Image: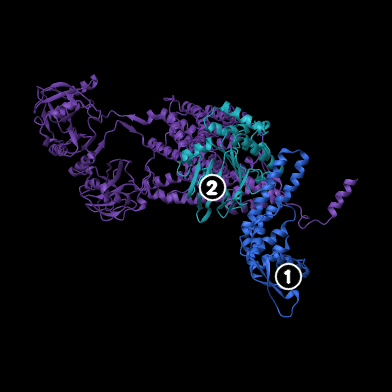
Amino acid sequence: MSIGHTLLGLLESGPRHGYDLKRAFDEKFGHDKPLHYGQVYSTMSRLLKNGLVEVDGIEAGGGPERKRYAITDAGVTDVQRWLATPEKPEPYLQSTLYTKVVLALLTGRDAAELLDVQRAEHLRLMRILTDRKRKGDLADQLICDHALFHLEADLRWLELAAARLGKLAQEVRSA
Amino acid sequence: MSLDTRATAGAARPGPPGAGRTAPRGVRAWARDLAMGMRFAAGGREGWTRTILTAVGVGLGVALLLGAASVPELMERREDRSVARSAEDQFSGKKVDRSDSTVLQRDLTTDFRDMTVNGRVLRAEGSRPVLPPGLEKIPADGEMVVSPALRDLLDSSEGALLKERFGKYRVTGTIGDAGLIHPKELYYYAGSHALTPAKGGHRVAKFGYAQPGEPLDPLLVVLVVLACVVLLTPVIIFIGTAVRFGGDRRDRRLAALRLVGADAHTVRRIAAGESLSGALLGLAVGAIAFLGLRELFGMFDLTQVSAFPSDVVPLPGLALLILAAVPVTAVVVTLISLRAVSIEPLGVVRSSKPRRRRLWWRLVMPLLGLGILLAAGRVGGDMGPPVYAIGLGSTLTLVGLAALLPWLVEASVARLRGGGPVPWQLATRRLQLSSGTAARAVGGITVAVAGAVALQMMFGAMHDDFNRATDNDPGRAKLVVRADVGDGQLAERMIDKFRTTKGVKNVIGTVTTYAVRPGKMSADTLRPLTELTVASCANLRELARIGTCEDGDTFVVHTGNKRLNKWVDASARPGKQLDLNPVSWDEPGHRHVLWTLPADSRTVRARPDPGGEVHDGVYATPGAVDLSKLVDASTTAMVQVDPDVPDAEEYIRNTAAHVDPFLDVMTLHAVERDKQYATIHTGIQAGAMATMMLIAASMLVSMLEQLRERKRLLAALTAFGTRRGSMAWSVLWQTAIPVAIGLALAVAGGLGLGYVMVRMIQKSVTDWWMFVPLTVAGGVLVAVVTLLSLPPLWRMMRPEGLRTE
Amino acid sequence: MTPAGSLLTAHGLRKAYGPTTALDGAAFSIHPGEVVAVMGPSGSGKSTLLHCLAGIVRPDEGSITYDGRELTGMPDSALSALRRSEFGFVFQFGQLVPELTCVENVALPLRLNGARRKEAEATARTWMERLEVDDVAAKRPGEVSGGQGQRVAVARALATSPRVVFADEPTGALDSLNGERVMELLTDAARSTNAAVVLVTHETRVAAYSDREIVVRDGRSRDMERVI
């Protein structure tokens, strides 16, 4: 999961203080694992360096946590590219996909499209595996089947998520 | 050892609640399971559909059985009312003296188109006349009291001509139900002062005389017994089929019960309970249908069958028998039908190799039946017909045929190897897989047709006994009007009136009287007497080959019979006298009317009149005899009708009524049918119709049930492009093959039964091809069932059936 | 509108059953020899789409072109003839005539097309061999396992050498091993005869046997090929 893209995405709705960013991240994606502020700081400086964010202003009283960041046009483009690129189908993708979906919803992008893209990517891989299985020996078949079952589980999750997008959008926006 | 301990341990262990109680056995188990089955019957849409199907089927059967059980009572009550309104002494010949309560009556029946209107003309002779039932007073002169049906007829436009006939009477009242045999009877009482004993009036002192009823001909008894068996056996078979409606689906539901722990016996009893509630509901439906149809009988006149609802009462014994037999049949049939099926927790297993049907007992039944009939001896002479042997023998034969059918269907379709076009293949394979269902559906038709073939053969053999070919020649005259008119001039006038009536082509009018040879004769010799017929030359020419003729001529007419010719010559002696008043000739005070037979009278040969009779004696033209002098003449008008004029007969009858209401009008028919025979024939036809409809209904139900069960398959077949026609044909074959086998068996069995029965009544089979129309009817039945199942078939072939949800 | 070289295309399909809208502007296209999976949640209209494409159900609106011919206006008899000769069908269950033997079932569409019984059954037997069910040829559908029955159904769908096979949840009633075997045999056979397969399924592992996927949601279709 890319924290940088996530934080960038959170900035899309408007400039925020570093501390606000951490709070928003924890609320929406942190769950049981809150972000260290140091991570925010280092990520933001990297983004700043790459020109994806800019400092919008500094509150009186100084201190890095008082810096207010705003996303640049390059930053928006970067988020867009990240969301539109399917993840390489691999195990335990859910948290990344979830983050992407929520961010898409938060930034008013088409979350369903995102899921469909991912779905197509999954199925593409499944086809390849199925094809390999048909041509391969028993060992190949067993290996492919293992992967296929995992991919199938992911796909089911994608389907479920797609079916529940409306509800998720409500929750995300109200939070 | 170890086994023992386990057993004790098991017994000691406190079981789950309820396990400690032993499961009920015997009667209690039966009662419990039947009750549970009855609850199932009322539960859910499936349960209801099945129960209602069964109930309607059983109900129809029960209604028919109740109807049949009511026939004896119906006949008796009709007879009672018929007796109550007839005059006490009409047939006793006793002379009744005139008194304050006597009534003069004369039966006066008239035909109207194909209807017969019975009635009587009455005239009270005193102030306290006796009354026939249904009348409040004797109608006064010119008044008429009519039955409701006759009143409706007279008021309708259809009855206008009849109203004209009764023109001189005013309708003043309605005959009460007590005075009518059945509600649609056309009957009237008319009052007329013109009625005198001389006009045929008969003096009555009391109404209600048990006239000796005609005992039913033993041949007809045989026929009635056979007809009852033939008509009712299919109904019973139908009830057996109705109880099985929806059985396949029920079995599947019962499997669910096995899953929760019911044992095989329990499930069977539950199934029996389900059928039982269908049957009980069917009894209720049947009773209601019976009561409803009873009312209908009172309202409609279906092929001359109408009855007062209150007359249609089943005999208590028979009604009880029906009430008891139907539920018992339901339970027994269900248990038998479940024999070949084992209901397992996960579904229904039909023994994949069904027990082959055994032939021997199926053959024994009809053979035993025929044997009983053959051993029963012959009907004839004074011995009453062996009613029980006929009943038992024919029942066994017919039921045996029904039992033989499943074996035959199975054996026949097993030979079909699935060749032929696709619809044929589908149908034969289907039949091979479950020939029982098909055979059961056709069982009824087999019995009905076999019985009907036998009945038809009986009819054919008995036909000549009950259909007397008359000598009547309707080609020359259609109606004969007779009047006992003592006045010859009046008679001529009557003939004139007919001539000018619409629709009359020709009238042969004659005035006849008897002429006696006068003079002294010894007391022990019969006084020669001959008939004198007076008519115009043209009319006489119709009755004898008279050659040249002009008014004033006379003839002596001979027939082919020499003895009779001698008798004619004894009185008709040209140049000698005859006395034209034949009444009480030798008694004192006789008024002679002497007339001389002209000496130039030629002797000619008679020819039959349109009524088929040959008249010999003396023929005279009006110029030769003074008609006004005749004392006891009667006038006959043989009226030839123009067949192109509709209602010509009615105009003639109206003219006759106009001339004199007491004229007798007879219609000539080439064949005269015995009335009882005709009634039985009508009854059998009506019964056969009802039975056929029942059979069609049951075949349709099983066909629809089968189609509904394969809704998904039908939709799949449509999907891969099966033509509707192919499916329709397969449905047709599926019905037609068993029906064809059933009909073949029915014809064979029917011919056998018919032959034995005909032999029993000592006749010979007149026509072995009587079964052809019946097999045609069977074909029509197949077509009708197929046609009626097509719309649902189309509906089920729609792709909606493919949807899984 | 019609993609070049496609055998069966549809666009703008609308179909309502009473108040329920089953299809709301769906589109579809398939090439010869292509296996296209139609996926989507239950009730999304995928079966209806298949029924419309196969000419079993007439859409309320839209057009369906098969081999240059417009299906929507065709009379029923022509559609039936098309289904008999050009299309093959496999359903989830309940499609085999229970009283016919398996080989007679496979021969049935051939015979409906007018083939003689002997020839039809000979062809049927070769297809049954191909689907490895020739040993149950003389049995009735009730006497064979679910997997065998479904393979008999596939053999029947292929027996007429159709140009399009419509398969509606063909493995729905089977376990995964049997299901995959059926899919393998079906797709192999279809590819070898260059038949197109329209495969409606809700199982992704079954859909993985396809070349392309279409997702139907709320009566609208989405070609997943063009997503990426």
* Subunit of label 1: A
Please give the residue where the numbered disc 2 appears in the rendered image: B800
* Image spot of residue B495 (x, y percent): 15, 36
* Image spot of residue B645 (x, y percent): 21, 38
Distance between the alpha carbons at the discs numbered 2 and 1: 56 Å
Query: Residue flagged by tag 1: what amino acid is it?
Result: Lys
Residue B564 visible (yes or no): yes
Quadrant housing residue B647: top left
Determine whether, in the image, residue C190 is placed left or right of residue B685: right
For chain B, the rendered hue is purple
Say which of B52 and B453 sits in front: B52
Chain (cyan): C
Kindly state the secondary structure of the residue where label 1 is placed.
Answer: helix
Crowding near pointer 2: few (<14 within 10 Å), some, many (20+)? Answer: some
Marks 2 & 1, CB-CB < 8 Å contact: no
User: Outermost residue, right direction?
Assistant: B1
